[in-house]
Image: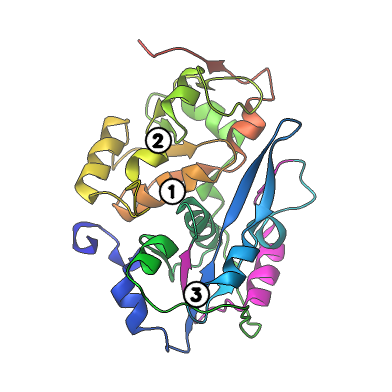
Amino acid sequence: MTNQIAHPEWLVERDWLAAHLDDPRLRIFDCTTHLRPDPATVYRVEAGRAGYQEEHIPGAGFIDIQADLSDNESPLRFTQPSAAAFAAAAGELGIGDGNRVILYSQTSVQWATRVWWQLRSFGFDNAAVLNGGLTKWRAEKRPLESGARRYPTAAFTARPRPNLMATAEMVRAAVADDAHTVINALSLDQHHGTGGTVYGRPGRISGSTCVPTASLLDPDTGAFIDMAEIRARLTAGGAAADAPVIAYCGGGIAASATAFLLTLNGFENVALYDNSLSEWAKDPSLPMEIGVPA
């Protein structure tokens, strides 16, 4: 699959990782988070640490995205932290400027792509996502270990790229500009306002298109579907290589997979709306719409 993409260095297969497990520069992380339904708060965040401790890829550490790599003073979950806070947290996790980082999840790839996008937004380009994550690694009967691992602390230098994380004002400007495309990574039911989780008001950001993250994954393995088909679906959703694209979802997690895939395939002007509908849908001054687009 990797020979079909513009940046094969950002997506690794299981054979590659198995052959490099002993590389001392490698930093492997399970990034799993679970969202448990909660009628009072939409969902409750639960780190996937228990599953990680039960079994993980040999040598892997664990990243708790909410606790480790989010601004926990923000009222919105998974908010991007400051550059200084991110650099300190990454260094504590053992990510240094000279490391190669491999990210995976026990469940959806979106948790790995969220951390990948955060790293990239702070100027770190030597990270990759494991295609198929733990699901395919386990199905192929590759080695696993239990317990917990921590890497030695390291020095991480943040070089912020603020254009990679969109704000509400950036999205408002984008939907008013035909040169921009805004893509919803949630389900079609959520896009139309007819079902699924609601983050305040039902429906979508006005003028946005929809390419569900789930439609870009093999439902049995969690791996990405054929890259040519992914490119076709993103293009059908309005993405163009020479035009700016903003991806959004409920809280900047599922859409990180969209942003990752766009970038992986050579779309150069891509941003992720950090707080997404968790912010937008709660502000009545920001335009939303429901129904099937004409």
Pointer 1 local density, CA inside 10 Å: few below 14, some 14–19, many at least 20: many
Which span of residues is magenta-colored? 76-104
Residue nearest the observer in this picture, 143 or 127: 143
Q: Tell me the kind of residue under disc 3.
A: Ile
Pointer 3 local density, CA inside 10 Å: few below 14, some 14–19, many at least 20: many
**Picture coordinates of residue 121, whole percent (x, y):** 53, 57
Residue nearest the observer in this picture, 48 or 93: 48
- State the separation of the CA atoms marked 2 and 3: 27 Å
Q: Is residue 66 left or right of residue 164?
A: right
Question: Which tag, 2 or 3, sits closer to the chain's start?
Answer: 3
What mark, if any, has residue 257 been given in the picture?
1
- State the separation of the CA atoms marked 1 and 2: 10 Å
- Residue at disc 2, secondary structure: loop
Q: Which residue is mark 2?
A: 212
Question: Which tag, 1 or 2, sits closer to the chain's start?
Answer: 2
**Picture coordinates of residue 88, whole percent (x, y):** 70, 71
Residue shown at 57%/77% (left/top)? 146
Q: Would you say residue 55 sits in the magenta stretch?
A: no
Residue shown at 48%/48% (left/top)? 256
Q: Is residue 53 above or below residue 224?
A: below
**Picture coordinates of residue 159, whole percent (x, y):** 57, 65
- Residue at disc 3, secondary structure: strand
Pointer 2 local density, CA inside 10 Å: few below 14, some 14–19, many at least 20: many
**Picture coordinates of residue 182, whole percent (x, y):** 44, 31
Q: Tell me the kind of residue under disc 1.
A: Ala
Residue nearest the observer in this picture, 188 or 89: 188
Q: Is residue 7 above or below residue 230?
A: below
Q: Which residue is mark 3?
A: 28
- State the separation of the CA atoms marked 3 and 1: 18 Å
Q: Is residue 267 above or below residue 24?
A: above
Residue shown at 53%/63% (left/top)? 119
Quarter of the image for the C terminus: give it: top left
